[in-house]
Amino acid sequence: MDQTNDEQLRIIAEISESLSLSRVPHWLFGGWAVDFATHEITRKHDDVDFVVWESDVPAVKETFSSLGYESRPSRHPEHQQNWVKSGTKIQVNLVRRLSDGTVVSPGTFEDWPWTEDAFADHRGALGGIDVPIVSPHGQLESKRGFPLHPSGRRHRKKDVHDIALLERLVKLA
């Protein structure tokens, strides 16, 4: 592993452990969640992504601040917080449950529901670190559908890579 991977893994462990101690439900998301689901580092990562309930934002802010993370501006503050520590960017994506039980990201993506199983009890492990992750099925549907949403964008090379891995994981389940 390279130094960036080591630092990002340390940050993933630190955040997950601290949020767990604060009783804040959270899920690793994005490329690192794919790696934790496959139990191996499959590519280089630019950042670390987590998902939390919108109602837990005050506890998240308190936890991150107490750990020395610095808040950064977000283009979409209604559904994403940005933080940084030791040069590592962390994105905290927010979700809320609607009255009908549907889970959505507030703001721009509120019209695009998450899959029912996305935030079930799925865990991933890598390098001796065990954390809650967005389900492989939930990640797959999110990554597949992103270009179809009006605010989405075309798949990048890393998205195509992650989709292929997630498709294999979902088939095996």
Image (cartoon, grey):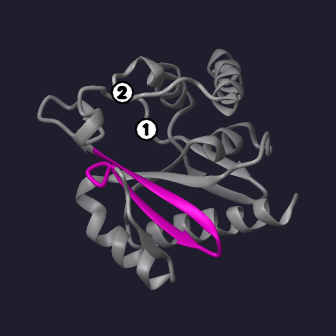
User: In the image, what residue occupies the spot 53% across and 23% down?
Assistant: 154
Q: Residues within 10 Å of mark 1 (few under 14, many from 20)?
A: few
Does the segment drawn in magenta span residue 79? yes
Give the vertical position of 98 relative to 74 (above or below).
Answer: above
> What secondary structure characterizes most of the magenta part?
strand
Please name the residue that numbered disc 1 is placed on: 120
Query: Image quadrant of residue 85?
Result: bottom right
Does the segment drawn in magenta span residue 130? no
In the orientation shown, which residue stands out farthest toward the left? 99
User: In the image, what residue occupies the spot 65% across and 56% down?
Assistant: 130
User: In the image, what residue occupies the spot 80% across and 43% down?
Assistant: 40
Give the vertical position of 101 relative to 76 (above or below).
Answer: above
**Kind of element beneath mark 1:** loop
Q: Residues within 10 Å of mark 2 (few under 14, many from 20)?
A: few
Task: List x then y, in percent, for residue 42.
Answer: 79, 39
Identify the magenta region.
Answer: 76-95
**Kind of element beneath mark 2:** loop
Give the vertical position of 23 relative to 152 (above or below).
Answer: below
Query: Image quadrant of residue 60?
Result: bottom left
Marks 2 and 1, how far apart in space? 8 Å
Task: List x then y, in percent, for residue 138.
Answer: 48, 29
In the picture provided, is 77 more to the left or to the right than 126?
left
Q: Which disc is residue 116 wearing?
A: 2
Task: List x then y, in percent, for residue 75.
Answer: 36, 52
Task: List x then y, in percent, for residue 147.
Answer: 47, 21
User: In the image, what residue occupies the spot 52% across and 31% down?
Assistant: 139
Three-letter code, disc 1: Ala
Q: Specify the quadrant that holds the N terminus.
A: bottom right
Three-letter code, disc 2: Glu
Q: Which disc is residue 75 wearing?
A: none
